Amino acid sequence: MGWILRFINNSRTTVKKRKHFELSSHEIKSAEKVLICIVQGKMFPNFSIPLVNAFKDNEGVIRIKTKLTERKDDPNFIAPILLPSNCILTTRLIEYYHHKHCHAGVQILMSILREKFWILKSQKTVRDVVRRCVRCRRYSSKSPVSDPKRIRYRRKLIEDFRSRFREEYLGQLCQKLLGKVGNDFKIGDIVIIEELSKKRVFWPLGKVIGLLPGRDGKVRTLKIRCKNSEIIRPIQRVYPLKVPIESNENVKFDGVAASSSSKVNDIITHNEVIKNKVSRSGRLIKVPERLGLFNNVLYVFE
Ligand SMILES: [Zn+2]
């Protein structure tokens, strides 16, 4: 449009006064105004504007009177130029500002445009343009790609934990089991009970309360007290948890193997600490007084 206007102006003037080279900012501005006037004349013929507070300025541009008239501000901000929503000029303008402001989002773009323009149905219009932006689309399509990446990473962490648990704990456990004989179990032993329906990590804990010998006189089955019940299990289905129970009074565990292993460790250090009378942080520990309420070792099943 700027070039067309220049051509018109140049042809109307003498050869000496003709302009050449790049368009000046004044030329660009008047081109913009001409375009706006064309669009406004087409979209709002005979001033048929759906807004009451619209007026034509002295250049013939339809503007919107805002309540800011008393303030000293940029005239464009006080009386922004009215633009229709469904129009190529509006779309191009929004695109221009969107690119100029580093692919700004809808809200930011709306407030930038509001400095100068009053776009009808502005939110929808701006949103539609931003949605169509190829670069923004490509960028937003990256996030669903990164999500599976995160899920994969989490899965890997869990897998790593599982394999470490298998190798470092259950691996050792199985080695110990190779030489397992019924007579290894004692009443009061804490054991992990195999439950094929569950993952190893979730196998419950129990306490041996009875040793049941087979025909050969060797212990073949165990009577075990679990969280809520008493069960009988063959020794092949039971794994000892190596805890120095002699020193454990009021051992608390939640009945799940995975977390209990760490709890058992806590208990061990706790007992060592009591022996040393110093906590891990170096604080002196008062040895709890024994009330003598229980003569036997007591396990609390939660
Ligand atoms: Zn964009």
Image (cartoon, rainbow, N blue to C red):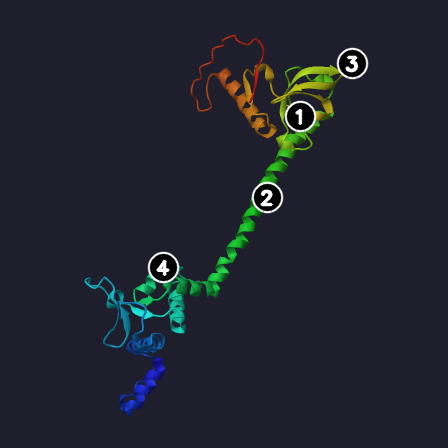
Disc 2 residue type (three-letter) = Lys
Foreground mark, 2 or 1, reads 1
Q: Is residue 168 visible?
A: no
Q: Nearer the viewer, residue 198 or 128?
A: 128
Instruction: Give the Cα separation between the discs numbered 3 and 2.
Output: 48 Å
In the rendered structure, which disc, 2 or 1, sits on the residue that comes first in sequence? 2
Foreground mark, 3 or 2, reads 3
- Residue matched to label 3: 217
Picture layout, residue 186 above or below residue 136:
above
Q: Quadrant of the N terminus?
A: bottom left
- Residue matched to label 2: 156
The answer to whether the residues at label 3 and label 2 have Cβ atoms under 8 Å apart is no
Label annotation for residue 108: 4
Residue at image location 35% in from the left, 66% down from the top:
120
Q: Nearer the viewer, residue 235 or 91?
A: 91
Picture layout, residue 302 above or below residue 122:
above
In the displayed structure, does residue 65 sit left or right of residue 149?
left
Disc 4 residue type (three-letter) = Ile
In the rendered structure, which disc, 4 or 3, sits on the residue that comes first in sequence? 4
Instruction: Give the Cα separation between the discs numbered 2 and 4.
Output: 39 Å
Instruction: Give the Cα separation between the discs numbered 2 and 1.
Output: 28 Å
Secondary structure under tag 4 reads helix
